[in-house]
Amino acid sequence: MQSIHLNYPIVEGKDTLAMTPQVLAIGEFDGIHLGHQEVIRRALQTAERMRIPASIMTFHPHPKEVLGQQKYTQLLTPTAQKEQVLSKMGLDNSYLVAFDPNFMKVTPEEFVENMLIPMNVNTVIVGFDFTFGFRGAGTPDTLCELAAGRFAVEVIRPFQLNGCKVSSTLVREYLQNAQLEEANRLLGRPYTITGTVVTGDGRGRTIGFPTANIEMSEPFVIPTLGVYAVRVTLDGEVYNAVMNVGKKPTFVEDLEKPTLEAHLFDFSRMIYGSALSVEFISFLRPERKFGSVDELITQIRTDADKARSLLSDNV
C-alpha cells in the first residue's frame, strides 16, 4: 500500500498523483471497526470488479479534535496504527489529508471540485453517516448530487452486530466501561496500543513481579483503569502478560497520569528503549488500593494465574 499525504486543494500539474481511475473509500475510520471494514471491503470488491486501484482517504488531525472536541485528542487508531491496520487489507493507496483551519472551511462543492475530481475517482464509497464540507453540510445525498454523473457513489448501510449499530463511539464507551470483550468484538480484533519501554520506579522487581513500563507512542484511548490479560509483541516474538493500567494507589497519592505496566511471563531480559505493541485480551478486575504490600503481592499472583489461564485458552 502506498501512503500519500495531501493538502487542499489538489493542483493539477503540481501534485504528482497517479491519476488513473480509482475507487475511493472516504472517512475518518478511527478504530477501523467492523462497520469501517464493510466500507473498505466494498471498495476493494468494486475496484476488483472494475480492475482499477482501491484507495482510502482519511484525515489528520481528527476533524472533531480540530473542532474542539477534547475526547478526540485520544484515538482508537492514531495515524501510524491506522496505517498499519490498513496496510493488511489489500488497498493500493492510502491518502492522508491535512485537516487544518483552511480545509475546515471548504464547502462540499469545493471538496468535490478541488479534491475528488482532480483525483480521477471512478467510484466513491462512504458510510451512511458520512458528512463533509464546512460544518458538516455535505451528506451522502449531497455527494450524489455533486457527482453529477462524473463518478459513481455507493452508500453503505449501518453495520449491525447483535442488534447494535457498530460505531467508534460505542467502542470507546466499551473500553472505558470495562467491557473489553465487547469492544474487541466490534473491532474484529484485540484493541492494541504501541509504545516504548521506559524506566519506572523499579518497585515491581523488588516484589517479584518486574514490569515493562510503557510510554505510548501515539495518543491512544486508554482503557478503564484496571488489570488486564494481554499479549505483548516484542522483536517479532509474542509473550503472554498481565498488565496494570492505573495510578498505583497502594503506593502513590493522586498520581496525575495513568501508567501502563506489563509483567511478561517467563521473561527476564532488560528491554529499556524497546518498541512493543500490546493487545488487550481480557479485563480481569478494576484497580484498587490494598492495605499492605503483602496483600498486593497475593492479588498479583492471583491476577497472573488467571491471565495465564485465559491466554492459554484464547489462542
Image (cartoon, helix red, strand yellow):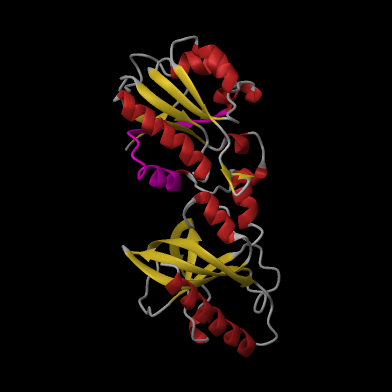
Task: State whether residue 201 is above or below residue 69.
Answer: below
Q: Residue furthest front?
A: 162
Which quarter of the figure is the C terminus placed in?
bottom left
Q: Position of residue 271 (x, y in %)?
A: 37, 70
Task: State whether residue 275 is above or below residue 128.
Answer: below
Q: Position of residue 47 (x, y in %)?
A: 35, 28
Residue occupying the point 36% across, 67% down: 238
| Magenta part of the chain | 80-100
Task: State whether residue 223 is above or below residue 199.
Answer: above
- Specify whether 95 is left or right of 63: left
Q: Position of residue 58 (x, y in %)?
A: 48, 34
Look at the image and say whether residue 174 sits in the magenta stretch: no
- Specify whether 217 is left or right of 255: left
Q: Residue furthest bottom?
A: 294
Residue occupying the point 49% across, 61% down: 215
Viewer-closest of 44 and 277: 44
Instruction: Let me know if residue 230 appears in the view.
Output: yes
Q: Position of residue 307 (x, y in %)?
A: 50, 75
Viewer-closest of 311 and 258: 311
Residue occupying the point 39% across, 47% down: 84
- Specify whether 23 is left or right of 27: left
Which quarter of the figure is the N terminus placed in?
top left
Look at the image and say whether residue 90 sits in the magenta stretch: yes
Task: State whether residue 248 is above or below residue 77.
Answer: below
Instruction: Let me know if residue 219 appears in the view.
Output: no
- Specify whether 108 is left or right of 12: right
In this rendering, the count of numbered labels is 0
Residue occupying the point 35% across, 43% down: 87
